[in-house]
Image (spheres, coloured by chain):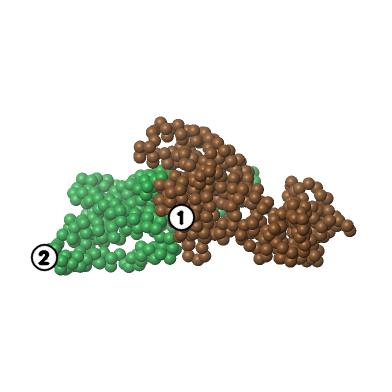
Chain colours: A brown, B green
């Protein structure tokens, strides 16, 4: 597999702290990569440097092995879908979509007939054929985003960049657009680079997810790995409802490490135990949905915690717990009905050692295992 | 009568109460003056005294007797040239202010530089041009020193050129502000989208920026045209006999000839033509206006 886009030690400095520091990754042809991070994590800046809308302070961007760091945006073979759609308000839907192709006609690279068929085809793809003569302000948010999608795709770019394209849509519209994007990516086999702050969206859509924080790339891996095998407490905290706790390795053997948490609670970890030796302070991750809860009684597995909050979320119930004898707090998600616990109940909490992962020594390290 | 109609009657009375002050203002400052203008235009004079009447003779004279019509046309031409000149000068400034001034601080400074000349009296600014363009003015002094010319040029001052120049200088801020107001609405992401789709700066300018700023250009044009056409200070100070404008004629008719009916008639014609032009321009502006 060849890299179509490569970022090499990208840096961006606006004055103040670095907005993006030493971000390197490569994207293979046809891949769907998401850049995931909170606002201010540098994900949008990274995308804009790839698009050529921002000049890196240091580092370079490669396209099919060629350095394009200083190639103007207009000459890069990639199209962007903007968060605010950035449609041209003076042009109809049809003319918005045809904009990029009309520019090519001036350069003799496309014919009028071709423009007609291609604009028609892509308007059909995004289900807007009936709205071709409308102006952007006459469309709904979802329709506008589909116009902007068609406008980007119609010129047949090998790379399509998305800057939080669904950020300004309501929840149900966002869901249906996610399906649409997934389908388009499957059908068109283009390279998609997608910026979002929504971890569920990033997980669901992409082949790989790059997690950014404070301008640093923390981890880049398939969604499954990011979720189950985060390389740092930051990634674990950001992705899904993970409990990241500090503890000391009490004993080790047979691939199982026993970690003592605050309040004398003990958990057994089977994942990534090579990282720690007996006596080390470590960070462990317990995913909220993998905690087993049962009414506390003598002889039960695990440690005791009290329910401090109960949130009914429809398909699941979220419990906020406080470990006995400490102020360690935990979240647990109950998807089946494990007993309908109430506020103030004392529960016995345990976890399958296979799902308890040692993330690193404390203070948490950045290096990948 | 039902309760509903009673309530409506009360609402209507309240509404009238609320509207009374602005209606009164409108009557005193708009309807009455225009009415008087119209009343005077229908009268005649007898040895410099006004005689009321009902004749359209004066209105007809505006179009039939020289120099009224030709001065009117000349004034409109000077107004149009001023509008064009102001637009050409204003556009780059507005563009720079809207797209190339990132920090709020430098934006404020440029804004201030545009506005500050308005703190000086109009008369002073018009006089300033007199000292620049006159035979012993700065321009002539520079050219003499550079040996471009051997004796002071009289060409710069007291003609239509100097009037247009002065008017452009004075009214350009109006154009800047109205064009800037339009350009400022264009989101940066739209320009980025254009270049992302492969457009050169020139293509982005002709396909997006200029069409989107047209309402501002037209609005600025209307203001500068209207203000310049009716101006009387610039032609009086820096314009020679050749650059006499319609307002100067009206002043002479009022204060020297005491032909108030004639002056009022010219006023009616100017207001009529002006209203028609502004209506057309406003229609065009409305047509060009886009919703984001």
Residue A314 visible in image: yes
Mark-to-mark CA distance, 1 and 2: 63 Å
Q: Cβ–Cβ below 8 Å for labels 1 and 2?
A: no
Residue receiving disc 2: B151
As drawn, is B14 to the left or to the right of B238? Answer: right
Few, some or many residues within 10 Å of mark 1 (<14, 14–19, 20+):
many
Q: State the image coordinates of residue B209 (x, y, percent, origin top left).
A: 39, 49
Q: Callout 2: helix, strand or loop?
A: loop
Q: Is residue B125 above or below residue B57?
A: below
* Picture quarter with the N terminus of chain B: top right
Q: How many tags in the picture?
A: 2
Q: Is residue A140 above or below residue B46?
A: above
Q: Residue at x 27, y 45 (%)?
A: B56
As drawn, is A66 to the left or to the right of B244? Answer: right
Q: Nearer the viewer, residue A193 or A31?
A: A31
Within the image, what quadrant is residue A174 found in? Answer: top right
Q: Nearer the viewer, residue A27 or B231?
A: A27
Q: Nearer the viewer, residue B86 or B238?
A: B86
Q: State the image coordinates of residue A357 (x, y, percent, origin top left).
A: 71, 56
Few, some or many residues within 10 Å of mark 2 (<14, 14–19, 20+):
few
Within the image, what quadrant is residue B28 found in? Answer: bottom left
Residue receiving disc 1: A60
To which chain does the residue with label 1 belong? A
Q: Residue at x 30, y 61 (%)?
A: B170
Specify the farthest residue to the front. Answer: A254
């Amino acid at each position: 597999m060849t890299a179509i886009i490569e970022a090499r030690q990208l840096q961006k400095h606006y004055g103040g702290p670095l907005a993006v520091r030493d971000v390197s990754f490569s994207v293979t042809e046809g891949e769907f990569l998401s850049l995931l991070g909170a606002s201010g994590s540098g994900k949008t800046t990274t995308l804009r440097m790839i698009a050529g809308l921002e000049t890196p302070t240091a580092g370079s961007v490669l396209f099919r092995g060629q350095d394009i760091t200083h190639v103007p945006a207009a000459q890069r073979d990639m199209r962007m879908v903007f968060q605010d759609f950035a449609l041209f308000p003076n042009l109809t839907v049809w003319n918005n979509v045809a904009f990029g192709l009309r520019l090519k006609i001036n350069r003799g690279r496309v014919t009028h007939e071709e423009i007609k068929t291609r604009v028609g085809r892509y308007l059909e793809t995004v289900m807007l054929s009936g709205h071709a003569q409308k102006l952007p302000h006459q469309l709904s948010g979802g329709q506008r985003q589909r116009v902007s999608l068609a406008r980007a795709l119609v010129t047949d770019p090998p790379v399509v960049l998305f800057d939080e394209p669904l950020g300004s849509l309501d929840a149900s519209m966002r869901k249906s657009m996610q399906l649409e994007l997934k389908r388009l990516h499957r059908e068109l086999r283009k390279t998609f680079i997608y910026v979002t702050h929504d971890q569920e969206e990033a997980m669901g859509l992409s082949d790989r997810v790059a997690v950014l924080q404070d301008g640093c790339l923390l981890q880049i891996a398939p969604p499954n790995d990011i979720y189950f095998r985060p390389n740092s407490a930051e990634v674990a905290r950001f992705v899904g409802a993970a409990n990241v706790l500090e503890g000391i390795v009490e004993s080790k053997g047979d691939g199982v490490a026993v970690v003592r948490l605050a309040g004398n609670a003990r958990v057994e970890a089977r994942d990534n135990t090579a990282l720690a030796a007996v006596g080390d302070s470590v960070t462990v991750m317990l995913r909220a949905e993998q905690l087993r809860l049962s009414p506390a009684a003598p002889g039960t597995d695990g440690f005791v915690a009290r329910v401090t909050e109960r949130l009914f979320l429809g398909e699941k119930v979220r419990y906020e717990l406080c470990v006995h004898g400490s102020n360690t707090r935990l979240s647990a998600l109950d998807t089946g009905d494990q007993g309908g616990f109430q506020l103030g109940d004392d529960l016995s909490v345990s976890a399958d050692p296979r799902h308890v992962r040692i993330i690193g020594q404390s203070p948490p390290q950045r290096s990948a295992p | 009568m039902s309760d509903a109609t009673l309530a409506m009657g009360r609402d209507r009375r309240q509404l009238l109460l609320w509207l009374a002050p602005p209606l009164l203002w409108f009557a005193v400052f708009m309807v009455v003056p225009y009415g008087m203008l119209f009343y005077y235009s229908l009268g005649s004079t007898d040895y410099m005294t006004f005689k009321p009447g009902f004749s359209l003779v004066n209105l007809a004279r505006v179009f039939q007797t020289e120099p009224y019509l030709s001065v009117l046309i000349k004034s409109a031409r000077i107004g149009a040239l001023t509008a064009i000149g102001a637009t050409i000068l204003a556009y780059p400034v507005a563009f720079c202010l809207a797209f190339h001034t990132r920090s709020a601080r430098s934006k404020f400074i440029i804004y201030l530089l545009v506005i500050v000349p308005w703190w000086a009296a109009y008369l002073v600014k018009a006089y300033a041009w007199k000292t620049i363009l006159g035979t012993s003015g700065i321009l002539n002094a520079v050219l003499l020193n550079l040996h471009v010319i051997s004796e002071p040029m009289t060409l710069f001052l007291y003609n239509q050129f100097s009037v247009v120049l002065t008017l452009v200088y004075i009214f350009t801020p109006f154009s800047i502000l109205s064009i800037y107001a339009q350009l400022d609405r264009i989101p940066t992401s739209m320009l980025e989208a254009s270049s992302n789709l492969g457009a050169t700066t020139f293509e982005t300018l002709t396909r997006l920026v200029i069409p989107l700023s047209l309402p501002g250009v037209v609005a600025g044009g209307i203001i500068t045209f209207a203000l310049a056409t009716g101006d009387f200070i610039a032609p009086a100070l820096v314009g020679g006999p050749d650059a006499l404008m319609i307002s100067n004629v009206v002043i002479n008719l009022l204060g020297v000839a005491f032909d108030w009916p004639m002056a009022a008639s010219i006023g009616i014609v100017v207001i009529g033509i002006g209203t028609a032009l502004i209506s057309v321009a406003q229609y065009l502006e409305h047509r060009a206006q886009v919703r984001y």
